[in-house]
Amino acid sequence: MTQTFRKKRLEIIVEEPILGRLTDALIRENVTGYTIVPALGGYGSAGPWHRENALSRAGHMVVLVCILDERLVESVLSAAYGIVSRQIGIVTLSDVEVVRPDLF
Amino acid sequence: MTQTFRKKRLEIIVEEPILGRLTDALIRENVTGYTIVPALGGYGSAGPWHRENALSRAGHMVVLVCILDERLVESVLSAAYGIVSRQIGIVTLSDVEVVRPDLF
Amino acid sequence: MTQTFRKKRLEIIVEEPILGRLTDALIRENVTGYTIVPALGGYGSAGPWHRENALSRAGHMVVLVCILDERLVESVLSAAYGIVSRQIGIVTLSDVEVVRPDLF
């Protein structure tokens, strides 16, 4: 039986120009890793949009995924929200199980 | 303490040619936003496939993610399933917490 | 009322060169489908990285998402972890609901 451990999955949808500020904040809050996925397009309060050029880093939205230990959730969520709240962006948190607890 | 609110995360994996019909249906059902991520490849009942060209919108699959208020789930799920059920596509729903409830 | 069924969502973040071995193992374990999303960049124990070239399959990380019936979780998780544990990679599991239980 593979043992699993409860962690939190933080998913942040944010405009690429803000990404550097966001990842700096995550690392400052002791996040041990994150992964960024490109968005192809979407729809929000500003209407629909789509990415014109392959994986260009200019403009448009990206999805950052990050697995957190419960003890980091409050500070990381607060730091992330501090950056994203003044911009277009969505912050969601969900429950996940992981196999290697030492990584987070 | 950052307050969070329970919402639902809808994830729909669908072929790109159907995407327009799907997003029209979501907006008709009062979804306030969604994000589309390109799939690079995958495997399903039709066997394996992979995307040949960068972020071309032709053919292949995409992943649409959408955060919903609980009161929209039934109608949105039904509308999404009405479109995806006759095609290749996967519709999943999960629990998430968000910081800004007014966005959904 | 659209009926939903509980399944597990397996998300594996892994380096692309290992992907073939991982997907072979998933199919051997009777997984009925998966979807692969490209990562644009990220951060982990080896520091930050980002993808230089569009959707090139060489190097870098990808995110594999797979919906599993509960009865497959133990064997699939064990097979996936057997491959990913010696590499850079993150395996997470979460609860989801699906509309078509026969697909998984």
Image (spheres, coloured by chain):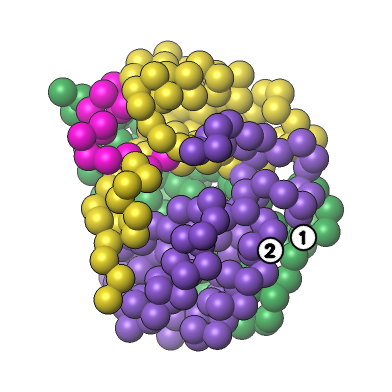
Chain colours: A green, B purple, C yellow
Kindly identify which chain the residue marked by label 1 belongs to. Answer: A
Q: Quadrant of the N terminus of chain C?
A: bottom left
User: Does residue A89 appear anywhere in the picture?
Assistant: no
Residue B23, quarter of picture:
bottom right
The answer to whether the residue labelled 2 contacts the one labelled 1, judged by CB atoms less than 8 Å apart, is: yes
| Residue B42 against residue B4 in the figure, above or below | above
The residue that mark 1 highlights is A51
* Residue at 63 percent of width and 71 percent of height: B21
Q: Which mark is residue C71?
A: none
Residue A93, quarter of picture:
bottom left
Please state which of residues B40 and A34 is positioned toward the viewer in this rendering. Answer: B40
How far across and down, in percent of the image, does residue B92 sit? Answer: 39, 57
> Could you tell whether B66 is left or right of C96 in the image?
right
Residue C103, quarter of picture:
top left
User: Does residue C68 appear anywhere in the picture?
Assistant: yes
The residue that mark 2 highlights is A41
Kindly identify which chain the residue marked by label 2 belongs to. Answer: A
> Could you tell whether A34 is left or right of A36 in the image?
left
> Magenta part mainly helix, strand or loop?
helix
* Residue at 66 percent of width and 35 percent of height: B50
C95 in magenta? no
Question: Which segment is the magenta one?
Answer: C66-78
**Which SS class for mark 1?**
loop
Amino acid type indicated by mark 1: Arg
| Residue A60 against residue C10 in the figure, above or below | below
